[in-house]
Image (cartoon, rainbow, N blue to C red):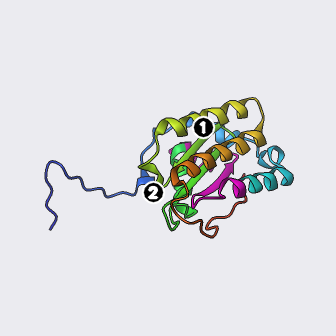
């Protein structure tokens, strides 16, 4: 038997099952989007991003996972926005499952030119939303100017600086738990 009071709440759905406002316009936009992720991010660019992730993760236990997606899956685009998709990938890719709860997902959606950063609970308590919003806004500005690689590189470096400041050498650096190569989803 479960007893509840005025201050308790029973949550029966996972956080990724949040309800977004259904949008036919969003669905149509993603349905008509022509895959261009490979055109925007060549193999050379992907290798450069992987190198920057390696550099940004040096000196602390923070883990950065970059996901670049051309468009939302058509079967999900009607009900799901980019924030919900980023949270879904955060869970599916196991970014939350690092030893020190130090995972950060950098999600870029090219169709909507949106950037989402999902941080794990170990970092959330010691950082401010304003810092993450600023990183996202700087990246969006570069994406609008069609500086795709530069946007990701600067975003990863900024995230690395935040993690370096947060962990401040308090915990010994661990082995790499997440891949440094960006995950490209068309």
Q: Secondary structure at mark 1?
A: helix
How many neighbours does mark 1 have within 10 angstroms: few (below 14), some (14-19), or many (20 or more)? many
Left or right side of 141 for 101: left
Residue under the image location 84 percent in, 54 percent down: 43
Q: Quadrant of the N terminus?
A: bottom left
Q: Does residue 76 appear left or right of residue 126 in this picture?
A: right
Residue 56 visible in image:
yes
Give the foreground label among 1 and 2: 2
Please give the label number shown on residue 136. 1
**Residue located 41% across and 54% down the image:** 15
- Whether residue 69 sits left or right of residue 146 in the image: it is left
* Mark 1 vs 2, N-terminal side: 2
The answer to whether residue 85 shows anywhere in this view is no
| Along the line of sight, the residue nearer the viewer: 185 or 52 | 52
Which residue sits at x=53%, y=66%?
Answer: 98
Q: Quadrant of residue 138?
A: top right
Judging depth in this view, the residue of 26 and 6 nearest the camera is: 6
Q: Compare residues 68 and 34 and report the one nearer the observer.
A: 68
Q: Is residue 182 above or below residue 162?
A: below
Q: Residue furthest bottom?
A: 175
55 on left or right of 159: right
> Residue 137's x, y, as percent?
61, 32
Q: Position of residue 83 (x, y in %)?
A: 52, 44
Q: Residue at x 23, y 52 (%)?
A: 9
| Numbered badge on residue 45 | none
Task: Look at the numbered disc 2 and give the secondary structure of its residue.
Answer: helix
- Which residue has dot 2 on it? 122
Q: Which residues are magenta?
A: 53-82
């Amino acid at each position: 038997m479960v007893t509840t009071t005025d201050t308790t709440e029973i949550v029966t759905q996972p956080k990724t099952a949040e309800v977004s406002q259904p949008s036919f316009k969003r669905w149509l936009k993603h349905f008509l989007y022509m895959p261009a992720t490979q055109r925007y991010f060549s193999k050379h660019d992907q290798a450069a991003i992987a190198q920057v992730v390696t550099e940004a993760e040096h000196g602390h236990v923070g883990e950065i996972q970059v996901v670049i997606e051309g468009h939302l899956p058509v079967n999900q685009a009607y009900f799901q926005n980019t924030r919900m998709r980023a949270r879904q990938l955060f869970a599916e890719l196991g970014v939350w499952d690092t030893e020190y709860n130090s995972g950060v997902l950098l999600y870029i959606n090219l169709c909507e030119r949106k950037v989402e950063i999902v941080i794990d609970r170990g970092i959330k308590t010691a950082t401010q939303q304003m810092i993450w919003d600023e990183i996202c806004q700087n990246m969006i500005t570069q994406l609008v100017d069609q500086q795709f690689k530069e946007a990701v590189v600067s975003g990863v470096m900024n995230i690395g600086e935040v993690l370096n400041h947060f962990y401040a050498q308090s915990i010994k650096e661990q082995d790499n738990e997440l891949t440094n190569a960006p995950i490209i989803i068309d």
